[in-house]
Image (cartoon, rainbow, N blue to C red):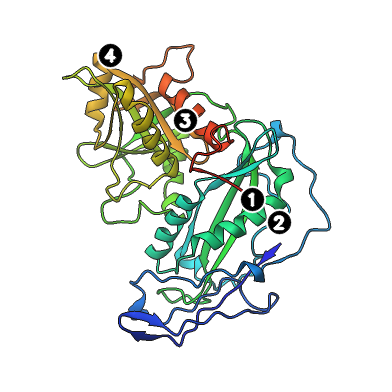
């Protein structure tokens, strides 16, 4: 168990537009909540509050006396097994506002170990940046990236025996921030707690790297303009569970979320959506994904796919665009034989090939042959990203060795 704590003083003064009088306070680990932060004033909650730098020297480590037996790799179920330790233990009041009004945000990131035993985090600063955006959206304070990466590195090194060395396996990290003020009054929480749990994982889907089918869903909406669909808040996921069950009962793996009268494609299940088509006018191959218009989660894997595509596909003659894609455009591309392939991207599965999309009573084939599980681009993207994650490109800036 890891414990680290600091307190933001409630006696903050405004001077030249900045919060002053910030004091850091070491607390009793047993009696005080870690990462407890008292907001200075409700009028300041629209600001992006910054926590004091985490003092890693105050970290205390209590090792378990009963280490778990490792689960064989072939029996790992995504999110079903956990390691011996976590960053900050939990003891919560049932009146904590997280239980009543969903004041919670989280991240998903991974640590990888190669055959030589070297451990790497993949783009941790991008995940922390997104966590800070999510936290600010629900009036939580933000965290200082370097100190948090240092804490994560310590935790991951302690749990390194849980990290498989097989390609496609990893240690999934779940940083979570929750509102801990004991109240049933609706308002910003005056305290927040940050914790991290770790889970050794294999392929996100039991079937492995195989194509899935989607139901184009127009009877429910995942996100809407000026909402919070671009943030990683627990509330965004809870409302998607019932439509996902409905799609599953019809034989589909996930929903393809649509929006608006034009049936614009937004996301695929819990993942960002990509489609590769041949442009009808120019004959050029295009890799397309929806733009970050406030309804789309800023996926770290999405950004990785776009970065690699611009670096490595554009020189091969491809175009890479972030723009709105309607189901009408996808249907037309299928009918014309111009749809090359489609796939999802996300931390859990990295790349998810898509075989079929059900839309208005039709099954649309997304370019795969009957005996084919993934297209050329999705296969290449998976190989590129996993190579960086596991250190095949050791100097790549996305790979952070711990």
- The quarter holding residue 368 reads top left
Residue position marked by numbered label 1 in the rendering: 198
- The quarter holding residue 320 reads top left
Residue position marked by numbered label 4 in the rendering: 337
Residue position marked by numbered label 2 in the rendering: 85
Q: Residue at image x 54%, y 26%? A: 209
Q: Nearer the viewer, residue 172 or 124?
A: 124
Q: Does the residue at mark 3 contact the one at mark 4 (Cβ under 8 Å)?
A: no
Vertical order, 7 against 384 (above or below): below
Query: Which mark, residue 352?
Result: 3
N-terminal of the pair, mark 3 or mark 4, is: 4
Q: Position of residue 193 (x, y in %)?
A: 55, 68
Which class describes the residues within 10 Å of circle 4: few (<14), some (14-19), or many (20+)? some
Judging from the image, what secondary structure is the residue with disc 4 in? loop
Q: Does the residue at mark 1 contact the one at mark 2 (Cβ under 8 Å)?
A: yes
N-terminal of the pair, mark 1 or mark 2, is: 2
Q: Position of residue 175 (x, y in %)?
A: 55, 56
Visible residue check, residue 205: yes
Question: How far apart, in angstroms, are the residues tagged by discs 1 and 4?
Answer: 44 Å
Question: How far apart, in angstroms, are the residues tagged by discs 3 and 4?
Answer: 22 Å
Query: Which mark, residue 267?
Result: none
């Amino acid at each position: 168990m890891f414990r680290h704590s600091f307190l933001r003083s409630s006696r903050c003064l405004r001077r030249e537009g900045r919060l002053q009088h910030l004091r850091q306070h070491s607390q009793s680990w047993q009696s005080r909540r870690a990462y407890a932060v008292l907001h200075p004033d409700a009028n300041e909650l629209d600001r992006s509050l910054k926590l004091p730098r985490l003092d890693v020297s105050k970290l205390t480590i209590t090792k378990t006396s009963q280490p778990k037996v490792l689960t064989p790799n072939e029996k790992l179920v995504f999110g079903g097994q956990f390691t011996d330790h976590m960053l900050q233990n939990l003891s919560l009041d049932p009146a904590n506002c997280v239980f009543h009004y969903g004041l919670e945000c989280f991240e998903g990131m991974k640590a990888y170990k190669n055959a030589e035993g070297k451990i790497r985090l993949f783009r941790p600063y991008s995940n922390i940046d997104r966590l800070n955006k999510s936290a600010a959206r629900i009036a939580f304070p933000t965290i200082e990236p370097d100190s948090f990466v240092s804490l994560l590195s310590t935790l991951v090194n302690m749990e390194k025996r849980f990290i498989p060395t097989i390609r496609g396996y990893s240690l999934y990290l779940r940083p979570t921030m929750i509102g801990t003020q004991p109240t049933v009054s609706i308002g910003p929480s005056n305290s927040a707690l940050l914790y991290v749990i770790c889970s050794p994982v294999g392929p996100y889907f039991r079937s492995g790297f195989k194509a899935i089918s989607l139901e184009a869903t127009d009877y429910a909406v995942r996100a809407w303009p000026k909402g919070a669909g671009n943030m990683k808040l627990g509330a965004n996921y809870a409302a998607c569970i019932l439509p996902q069950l409905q799609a599953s009962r019809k034989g589909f793996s996930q929903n393809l979320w649509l929006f608006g009268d034009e049936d614009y494609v937004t996301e695929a299940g819990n993942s960002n959506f990509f489609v590769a088509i041949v442009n009808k006018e120019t004959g050029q191959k295009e890799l397309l994904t929806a733009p970050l218009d406030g309804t789309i989660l800023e996926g770290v894997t999405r950004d990785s796919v776009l970065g690699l595509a611009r670096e490595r596909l554009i020189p091969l003659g491809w175009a890479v665009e972030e723009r709105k894609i309607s189901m009408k455009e996808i249907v037309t591309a299928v009918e014309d034989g111009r749809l090359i392939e489609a796939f999802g991207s996300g931390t859990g599965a990295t790349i998810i090939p898509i075989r079929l999309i059900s839309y208005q009573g039709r099954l649309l084939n997304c370019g795969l042959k009957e005996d084919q599980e993934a297209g050329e681009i999705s296969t290449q993207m998976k190989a590129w990203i996993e190579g960086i994650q596991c250190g095949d490109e050791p100097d790549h800036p996305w790979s952070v060795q711990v």
